[in-house]
Each structure stands twice: as structure tokens, then as C-alpha cells.
Amino acid sequence: MKNATIIFKKEIKEILKNRSIWLPILAISIVFSAFFPAALTGGLEKMVKDPDAVDFIERVFQDTSNLQLVMLQFIIKQFIVFLLLIPAMLPSLIAPASIILEKENNTLEPLIATPIKTGELFLGKALTSLIPSFAVSFINFLLIIIIVDSIAYTKFKLLPLPTWDWAVATFILSPVISFIITMICLIVSSKTVDIRSVQGIGSVVIFPIYAVIGLQIAGLFLLNVKYLIIVCFVLIAVCPIVLRLAIKIFDRENILTKWKMK
């Protein structure tokens, strides 16, 4: 664990200086954690006056005695999915850089020539992705709560956040997704010198997230605590599998003796 911490401290300083990583995440955070929540919560009065919106909500939800609260709950379920965009995208930007840039700078070979274990190496690099991802996700979590609750209380005397499904998504599902994507990125980046191809992994992962949003908007599916917990259990079971696979695929001997930049 000590060696993993050393690697994390070294790499996090470099990551924090890299604008190509933080500027896209900052833009996404502003849009999904500030602009969208403010616009949708502020426009709730118009939504509840729209006959089509009211008809949709009445079909999806059983209890519509408080239409404004139900509409807010539906909007919040979309924000939950948006929260998962950060832990899906940020590791795909950080993890490839931690391997491929070290190859380009010729610092990877000296690192793996030391007695450090492959598991410690991967843990240190995983922490470099996991901790920033969790920090950004948590800040977005708080920001959405403040914006939505402030507007909802001012207009409707409602405080819809936080909820249990938000807590599960933020504190369990978010870091688990980050870990799995980090391991996949490390596996791919250990076998390639093209950083763009590895960063494309995040784009692929985002498609299922958008699919969930589409299903919810269509009224075919709604996230709740039960579904989120099931997904958490499944993905937590996958974590040790991808870790072992990453350690197995990462060929230290090949990197030390045969690897050359193309």
C-alpha cells in the first residue's frame, strides 16, 4: 500500500496540471450540475401546466396527488444518471495518460524495473483516477442538491433532495464504475501507444448511461434504490475479476525487454 500511495502522490500532481483532462470535466459539470438543474427546476411550473407532461407523469407514477413533487422526482431520476457520467468519463481521460505518457517519456521501464508489485502499481494508478472522480462526483452531488432544493423550496416549499438512490449512486456506484473503467483503460493502454483509442472507452461506456435516460424519458423504466443496489452488487463482483485480468495481461517482462515506441 505504501508503494501505491507513492505512485498516487507522484501522478496526481501531473494530472492536476493537465488542462486537457480538467477542462472537459469542468464543462460537463457546469452543464449537468448547475445549468440543467436550475433550468429544469425553475421551469417546473410550466411543465405541470403542460397537458402532455401531466398525462405522461400520471401514466408513469401511481400517486400524483402532489404533481409538482412527482415531476421533481422524475427530473431528479435523470440527474442521478447524469451524475454517473463523471465517473465514466474521467478515468478514461486519466488512466490512459498514466501508462501511455510514461511510455512516451521513457519513465515506465524504470518504474516497473523496481521491486514494486504489479498489483501495487495498478492500485496506485487506480487511485489516481478514483479519488479525483469521486471528488468531482461528490461536488456535483452537493451542487445539484443546493440548486434544486433552493429553487424548489423558494417556489414550492419542497426539499426533494437528497434521497437514498442518490446516496447509493454517489457513494457506491460511482467509485465502482470508476474502478472498472480504470482497469479496462489500463489493460488497453498497456498494449497500445495510441492514447486516443484508449480514451474512446469512456465514450463507449456513456452509451448505456444515455440509454437509461432514454428509457426513463420514454416511461419504460425508472431507477430506484432496488435497481441501483442490484447493479452495485453485480459490478462489485466484477471488480476483482478485472483487477486480476489487468495484472495478468500487464506483461512487465515484455515492456522491459521488447517494448519500443512506434
Image (cartoon, rainbow, N blue to C red):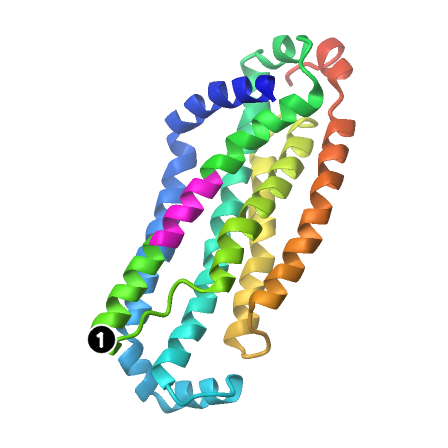
At x 25%, y 64%, the residue is 150
Regarding residue 147, the answer to whether it shows in the image is: yes
Magenta span main SS: helix
Establish if 15 lies above or below 175.
above
Establish if 171 lies above or below 101.
below
Magenta segment: does it hold 138? Answer: yes
Q: Is residue 142 left or right of residue 98?
A: left
Q: Nearer the viewer, residue 57 or 173?
A: 173
Regarding residue 31, the answer to whether it shows in the image is: no
Point out residue 227 in the picture as x, y percentages from the top left corner: 62, 66
Disc 1 designates what residue?
Answer: 155
**Quarter occupied by the N terminus:** top right
SS at circle 1: helix
The amino acid type, in three-letter code, at marker 1 is: Lys
Q: Nearer the viewer, residue 53 or 127?
A: 127
Q: Is residue 116 left or right of residue 178?
A: right
Extreme residue in the left direction: 154
Q: Is residue 239 left or right of residue 133?
A: right
Q: Nearer the viewer, residue 224 or 114?
A: 224
At x 32%, y 69%, the residue is 159
- Quadrant of residue 68 within the rendered picture: bottom left
At x 69%, y 9%, the residue is 115
- Quadrant of residue 223 within the rendered picture: bottom right
How many C-alpha atoms fall within 10 Å of the one at disc 1: few (<14), some, or many (≥20)? few
Point out residue 129 in the picture as x, y percentages from the top left corner: 52, 34
Magenta segment: does it hold 67? Answer: no
Point out residue 9 in the picture as x, y percentages from the top left corner: 47, 21
Point out residue 41 in the picture as x, y percentages from the top left corner: 31, 70
**Quarter occupied by the C terminus:** top right
Q: How many marks?
A: 1
What's drawn in magenta, residue-wise? 133-142
